Protein backbone atom coordinates (compact mmCIF):
# COMPACT_ATOMS: atom_id res chain seq x y z
CA UNK A 1 0.00 0.00 0.00
CA UNK A 2 1.20 3.49 -0.80
CA UNK A 3 2.49 5.84 1.90
CA UNK A 4 -0.37 7.50 3.77
CA UNK A 5 1.21 10.99 3.64
CA UNK A 6 -0.15 13.13 0.79
CA UNK A 7 2.35 15.08 -1.32
CA UNK A 8 3.08 18.44 0.33
CA UNK A 9 2.95 20.33 -2.96
CA UNK A 10 -0.78 19.49 -3.23
CA UNK A 11 -1.59 21.41 -0.05
CA UNK A 12 -3.35 24.75 -0.26
CA UNK A 13 -3.46 25.03 -4.02
CA UNK A 14 -5.05 23.41 -7.03
CA UNK A 15 -2.84 21.35 -9.30
CA UNK A 16 -3.48 19.49 -12.53
CA UNK A 17 -2.06 16.09 -13.42
CA UNK A 18 -2.72 15.33 -17.07
CA UNK A 19 -6.53 15.51 -17.38
CA UNK A 20 -7.29 15.05 -13.68
CA UNK A 21 -7.65 17.92 -11.25
CA UNK A 22 -6.16 17.58 -7.76
CA UNK A 23 -7.79 19.65 -5.05
CA UNK A 24 -7.58 20.16 -1.32
CA UNK A 25 -10.36 20.63 1.23
CA UNK A 26 -10.19 23.04 4.14
CA UNK A 27 -11.63 22.99 7.65
CA UNK A 28 -11.67 26.47 9.18
CA UNK A 29 -8.08 27.73 8.71
CA UNK A 30 -6.45 24.29 8.83
CA UNK A 31 -5.82 22.42 5.61
CA UNK A 32 -7.21 18.91 5.77
CA UNK A 33 -5.55 16.64 3.19
CA UNK A 34 -7.95 14.36 1.34
CA UNK A 35 -5.82 13.69 -1.73
CA UNK A 36 -3.68 10.59 -2.01
CA UNK A 37 -1.78 10.05 -5.26
CA UNK A 38 -4.46 11.84 -7.28
CA UNK A 39 -7.48 10.17 -5.63
CA UNK A 40 -9.71 12.35 -3.43
CA UNK A 41 -10.93 10.30 -0.47
CA UNK A 42 -13.93 11.29 1.61
CA UNK A 43 -12.04 9.97 4.62
CA UNK A 44 -8.48 8.88 5.34
CA UNK A 45 -7.25 6.27 5.74
CA UNK A 46 -9.27 4.34 3.15
CA UNK A 47 -10.81 1.03 4.23
CA UNK A 48 -8.54 -2.01 4.28
CA UNK A 49 -11.03 -4.25 2.44
CA UNK A 50 -14.03 -3.96 0.15
CA UNK A 51 -16.45 -6.43 -1.43
CA UNK A 52 -18.63 -6.35 -4.54
CA UNK A 53 -21.55 -8.45 -5.79
CA UNK A 54 -21.37 -9.32 -9.47
CA UNK A 55 -21.91 -12.07 -12.02
CA UNK A 56 -19.27 -14.80 -12.08
CA UNK A 57 -18.30 -14.09 -15.70
CA UNK A 58 -17.74 -10.41 -14.83
CA UNK A 59 -15.68 -11.39 -11.79
CA UNK A 60 -13.41 -13.54 -13.94
CA UNK A 61 -13.02 -10.71 -16.48
CA UNK A 62 -12.08 -8.30 -13.70
CA UNK A 63 -9.62 -10.62 -11.98
CA UNK A 64 -7.94 -12.06 -15.07
CA UNK A 65 -8.10 -9.11 -17.47
CA UNK A 66 -8.90 -6.10 -15.32
CA UNK A 67 -12.04 -5.27 -17.32
CA UNK A 68 -13.95 -2.62 -15.37
CA UNK A 69 -16.91 -0.43 -16.33
CA UNK A 70 -17.59 2.92 -14.68
CA UNK A 71 -21.29 3.62 -15.30
CA UNK A 72 -22.81 7.04 -15.94
CA UNK A 73 -25.04 7.95 -12.97
CA UNK A 74 -27.80 8.76 -15.45
CA UNK A 75 -28.17 5.03 -16.09
CA UNK A 76 -29.04 4.40 -12.44
CA UNK A 77 -31.67 7.14 -12.49
CA UNK A 78 -33.67 5.09 -14.96
CA UNK A 79 -32.95 1.63 -13.49
CA UNK A 80 -36.09 -0.14 -12.22
CA UNK A 81 -34.14 -2.38 -9.82
CA UNK A 82 -35.12 -1.30 -6.27
CA UNK A 83 -31.52 -1.44 -5.02
CA UNK A 84 -29.60 -0.27 -8.06
CA UNK A 85 -32.06 2.35 -9.26
CA UNK A 86 -32.25 5.85 -7.80
CA UNK A 87 -34.01 8.64 -9.76
CA UNK A 88 -32.03 11.22 -7.75
CA UNK A 89 -28.59 9.61 -8.13
CA UNK A 90 -25.83 12.24 -7.64
CA UNK A 91 -28.39 14.97 -6.91
CA UNK A 92 -28.16 16.26 -3.34
CA UNK A 93 -30.43 17.66 -0.65
CA UNK A 94 -28.87 19.69 2.16
CA UNK A 95 -29.71 22.16 4.90
CA UNK A 96 -27.58 25.32 4.72
CA UNK A 97 -28.08 27.96 7.41
CA UNK A 98 -31.49 26.48 8.07
CA UNK A 99 -32.55 26.63 4.41
CA UNK A 100 -33.25 23.47 2.35
CA UNK A 101 -31.07 23.36 -0.77
CA UNK A 102 -30.67 21.04 -3.73
CA UNK A 103 -27.43 20.43 -5.62
CA UNK A 104 -26.49 18.76 -8.87
CA UNK A 105 -23.48 18.33 -11.13
CA UNK A 106 -23.23 19.72 -14.64
CA UNK A 107 -20.47 17.25 -15.51
CA UNK A 108 -21.25 13.52 -15.85
CA UNK A 109 -20.43 11.25 -12.91
CA UNK A 110 -19.25 7.70 -13.61
CA UNK A 111 -19.59 5.20 -10.74
CA UNK A 112 -18.21 1.83 -9.69
CA UNK A 113 -19.74 0.66 -6.44
CA UNK A 114 -18.65 -1.78 -3.74
CA UNK A 115 -19.68 -2.56 -0.16
CA UNK A 116 -18.10 -2.49 3.28
CA UNK A 117 -20.18 -5.52 4.31
CA UNK A 118 -17.83 -8.52 4.77
CA UNK A 119 -20.67 -11.10 4.86
CA UNK A 120 -21.02 -12.51 1.32
CA UNK A 121 -24.40 -14.09 2.06
CA UNK A 122 -25.76 -10.76 3.24
CA UNK A 123 -24.33 -9.03 0.17
CA UNK A 124 -25.97 -11.51 -2.21
CA UNK A 125 -29.25 -11.18 -0.30
CA UNK A 126 -29.25 -7.49 -1.26
CA UNK A 127 -28.08 -7.96 -4.86
CA UNK A 128 -30.38 -10.79 -5.91
CA UNK A 129 -29.44 -10.69 -9.60
CA UNK A 130 -25.78 -11.46 -8.77
CA UNK A 131 -24.21 -14.85 -8.05
CA UNK A 132 -20.67 -13.97 -6.92
CA UNK A 133 -18.92 -11.80 -4.35
CA UNK A 134 -15.37 -10.61 -4.89
CA UNK A 135 -13.00 -9.37 -2.20
CA UNK A 136 -10.92 -6.28 -2.98
CA UNK A 137 -7.76 -6.15 -0.94
CA UNK A 138 -5.92 -2.84 -0.60
CA UNK A 139 -8.64 -0.55 -2.00
CA UNK A 140 -6.17 2.35 -2.08
CA UNK A 141 -3.90 0.50 -4.48
CA UNK A 142 -6.95 -0.49 -6.52
CA UNK A 143 -8.19 3.12 -6.73
CA UNK A 144 -4.79 4.31 -7.89
CA UNK A 145 -4.72 1.59 -10.56
CA UNK A 146 -8.11 2.76 -11.84
CA UNK A 147 -6.89 6.35 -12.01
CA UNK A 148 -3.62 5.45 -13.74
CA UNK A 149 -5.48 3.39 -16.33
CA UNK A 150 -8.06 6.10 -16.99
CA UNK A 151 -5.31 8.63 -17.63
CA UNK A 152 -3.32 6.18 -19.78
CA UNK A 153 -6.42 5.50 -21.89
CA UNK A 154 -6.98 9.21 -22.39
CA UNK A 155 -10.24 9.45 -20.48
CA UNK A 156 -11.29 13.10 -20.21
CA UNK A 157 -11.59 13.13 -16.44
CA UNK A 158 -11.86 16.14 -14.15
CA UNK A 159 -11.35 14.38 -10.80
CA UNK A 160 -11.53 10.95 -9.17
CA UNK A 161 -13.10 10.23 -5.78
CA UNK A 162 -13.62 7.34 -3.34
CA UNK A 163 -15.80 7.21 -0.28
CA UNK A 164 -18.90 6.16 1.64
CA UNK A 165 -22.28 7.81 1.00
CA UNK A 166 -24.39 9.46 3.68
CA UNK A 167 -27.92 8.00 3.76
CA UNK A 168 -29.71 11.23 4.60
CA UNK A 169 -31.16 12.49 1.34
CA UNK A 170 -34.78 12.49 2.55
CA UNK A 171 -34.23 14.84 5.47
CA UNK A 172 -31.33 16.77 3.95
CA UNK A 173 -27.67 16.50 4.90
CA UNK A 174 -26.11 18.90 7.39
CA UNK A 175 -22.42 18.02 7.05
CA UNK A 176 -19.92 20.79 6.13
CA UNK A 177 -20.06 21.86 2.49
CA UNK A 178 -17.93 20.02 -0.03
CA UNK A 179 -18.28 20.51 -3.77
CA UNK A 180 -18.55 16.76 -4.48
CA UNK A 181 -20.99 16.10 -1.63
CA UNK A 182 -23.99 15.03 -3.70
CA UNK A 183 -21.94 12.21 -5.21
CA UNK A 184 -21.86 10.78 -1.70
CA UNK A 185 -25.49 11.05 -0.67
CA UNK A 186 -28.19 8.39 -1.07
CA UNK A 187 -31.75 7.75 0.18
CA UNK A 188 -32.07 6.05 3.55
CA UNK A 189 -33.78 3.06 1.93
CA UNK A 190 -30.39 2.08 0.45
CA UNK A 191 -28.56 2.07 3.79
CA UNK A 192 -28.38 -1.74 3.94
CA UNK A 193 -26.01 -1.63 0.95
CA UNK A 194 -23.22 -0.20 3.15
CA UNK A 195 -21.78 1.21 -0.04
CA UNK A 196 -18.28 2.44 -0.81
CA UNK A 197 -18.10 4.01 -4.25
CA UNK A 198 -15.50 5.13 -6.74
CA UNK A 199 -16.57 8.16 -8.78
CA UNK A 200 -14.93 9.69 -11.82
CA UNK A 201 -16.13 13.18 -12.73
CA UNK A 202 -15.94 13.35 -16.49
CA UNK A 203 -15.56 16.23 -18.89
CA UNK A 204 -18.89 17.73 -19.98
CA UNK A 205 -18.31 16.37 -23.49
CA UNK A 206 -18.93 12.90 -22.02
CA UNK A 207 -22.42 13.74 -20.74
CA UNK A 208 -24.11 11.20 -23.06
CA UNK A 209 -21.48 8.46 -22.68
CA UNK A 210 -23.21 5.52 -20.90
CA UNK A 211 -20.06 3.99 -19.41
CA UNK A 212 -16.29 4.09 -19.41
CA UNK A 213 -14.52 0.79 -20.14
CA UNK A 214 -11.11 0.40 -18.53
CA UNK A 215 -8.58 -2.39 -18.98
CA UNK A 216 -6.58 -2.49 -15.76
CA UNK A 217 -4.59 -5.61 -16.58
CA UNK A 218 -4.65 -8.72 -14.36
CA UNK A 219 -5.97 -7.88 -10.88
CA UNK A 220 -5.47 -11.21 -9.13
CA UNK A 221 -2.98 -9.49 -6.83
CA UNK A 222 -5.80 -7.35 -5.43
CA UNK A 223 -9.07 -9.19 -6.09
CA UNK A 224 -10.35 -12.71 -5.46
CA UNK A 225 -13.67 -14.56 -5.47
CA UNK A 226 -14.92 -15.29 -1.94
CA UNK A 227 -18.37 -16.66 -2.65
CA UNK A 228 -20.27 -18.05 -5.60
CA UNK A 229 -23.83 -19.40 -5.75
Image: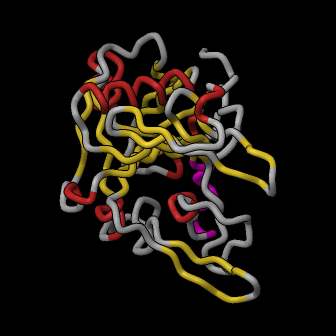
Would residue 36 be counted in the magenta stretch? no
Q: Quadrant of the N terminus?
A: top right
Q: Position of residue 81 (x, y in %)?
A: 37, 64
Would residue 190 be counted in the magenta stretch? yes
Taking the spot 51% from the left edge, 75% from the top edge, the residue there is 103
Image position of 39 (left or right of 110): right
Q: Quadrant of the C terminus?
A: top left
Outermost residue toward the bottom?
99
Q: Position of residue 193 (x, y in %)?
A: 58, 53
Taking the spot 44% from the left edge, 73% from the top edge, the residue there is 88
Taking the spot 74% from the left edge, 43% from the top edge, the residue there is 32
Image position of 121 (left or right of 78): right
Is residue 190 shown above or below 50? below
Is residue 223 shown above or below 185? above
Image position of 207 (left or right of 100): left
Q: Is residue 57 visible?
A: no
Instruction: Name the foreground residue: 28 vs 185.
Output: 28
Q: Is residue 58 visible?
A: yes
Is residue 33 shown above or below 215? below
Q: Main secondary structure of the magenta part?
A: helix
**Residues rendered magenta in the picture:** 188-195
Image position of 95 (left or right of 217): right
Taking the spot 46% from the left edge, 61% from the top edge, the residue there is 83
Q: Position of residue 13 (x, y in %)?
A: 58, 43
Q: Position of residue 104 (x, y in %)?
A: 45, 72
Outermost residue toward the top?
221
Locate residue 85: give its quadrant. bottom left
Amino acid sequence: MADASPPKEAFGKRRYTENFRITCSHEEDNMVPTIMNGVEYEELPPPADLWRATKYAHAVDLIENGLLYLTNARIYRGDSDPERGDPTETDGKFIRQGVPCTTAHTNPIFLWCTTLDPDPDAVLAVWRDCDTVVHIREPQAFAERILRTAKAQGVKGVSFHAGTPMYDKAQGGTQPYHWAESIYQKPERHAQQKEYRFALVGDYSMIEVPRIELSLGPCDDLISVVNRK
